[in-house]
Amino acid sequence: MINKEIKTIEEAIAGVKSGMTFMFGGFGLSGIPENAIKAISNSGIKNLTCISNNAGIDGFGLGLLLEKKQIKKMISSYVGENAEFERQMLSNEIEVELIPQGSLAERCRAGGAGIPAFFTPAGYGTEVQMNKEVRVFNGKKHILEHALISDFSFVKAWKGDTAGNLIFKGTARNFNPLMAMAGKITVAEVEELVPVGALNPNEIHTAGIFVQRIIKGDVFEKRIENRTTRKKN
């Protein structure tokens, strides 16, 4: 069995270059590859196209790349928690493609499955439809969406083994497995790294065939975007 374990985050992101397209897993701040994002922020590369469910928050997640103006284009479905992103978008400093969340997920899944494009009713009659082919299926209009792939996909899992098999936990399972399939090179950072054979095969969400590098993350802050509490009775 091939051992895909990488010892340092610098090795994990080896080969990243300016102008590349990256996918970053996670849902909001849940399950984002924190260590990889910080390393890319420190690398100085720029003109990146970033595909992610979200744009992070100010000072954390993809917000780190936005602060240094490393992102040229953002392909996302939810960007409402980042004031710097809003500023750059309104001042035309960054190119933005907003996609319905289900369409974003399916475009990533299609890329990983080798499906070049698909039709969906989501977005028809809105700006999302602009310049896209429209066809009618079962009496309903659908628009053509193309699959997404990346030069690198950076994902974060709860557990993984040295062969790259991954198990995700809770909300982190939303985009991470899809993006892991769609990267030419997929880098997984995990909270717990175990030997091959230690994971129950029936519980594995992403097979190691899709992962080229795996590393045990040093620190995961696991921040919460908006904490809502109530007073004690």
Image (cartoon, rainbow, N blue to C red):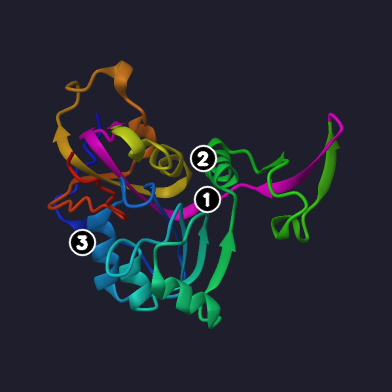
Range of residues picked out in magenta: 138-166
Where's the C terminus, which quadrant?
top left
Image quadrant assignment for residue 13: bottom left
Q: Nearer the viewer, residue 98 or 20?
A: 98
Residue at 38% in and 73% down: 66
Q: Is there a contact, CB below 8 Å, between mark 3 and mark 1? A: no
Residue at 24% in and 41% down: 4
Mark 2 = which residue?
Answer: 112
Q: Amino acid at mark 2?
A: Gly
Q: Would residue 81 be visible to someone looking at this image?
A: yes
Q: Judge whether 103 appears above or below 132 on screen.
A: above
Q: Is there a contact, CB below 8 Å, between mark 2 and mark 1? A: yes
In this rendering, position of residue 162 left or right of residue 183: left
Q: Would residue 18 be visible to someone looking at this image?
A: no
Mark sitting on residue 10: 3
Q: Earlier in the sequence, mark 2 or mark 1?
A: 2
Disc 1 secondary structure class:
loop
Q: How many marks?
A: 3
Q: Amino acid at mark 1?
A: Ile
**Marks 3/2: CA–CA distance:** 25 Å
In this rendering, position of residue 196 left or right of residue 66: left
Image quadrant assignment for residue 46: bottom left
Q: Earlier in the sequence, mark 3 or mark 1?
A: 3
- Residue projecting furthest to the front: 233
Q: Position of residue 189 (x, y in %)?
A: 24, 46
Q: Residues within 10 Å of mark 1 (few under 14, many from 20)?
A: many
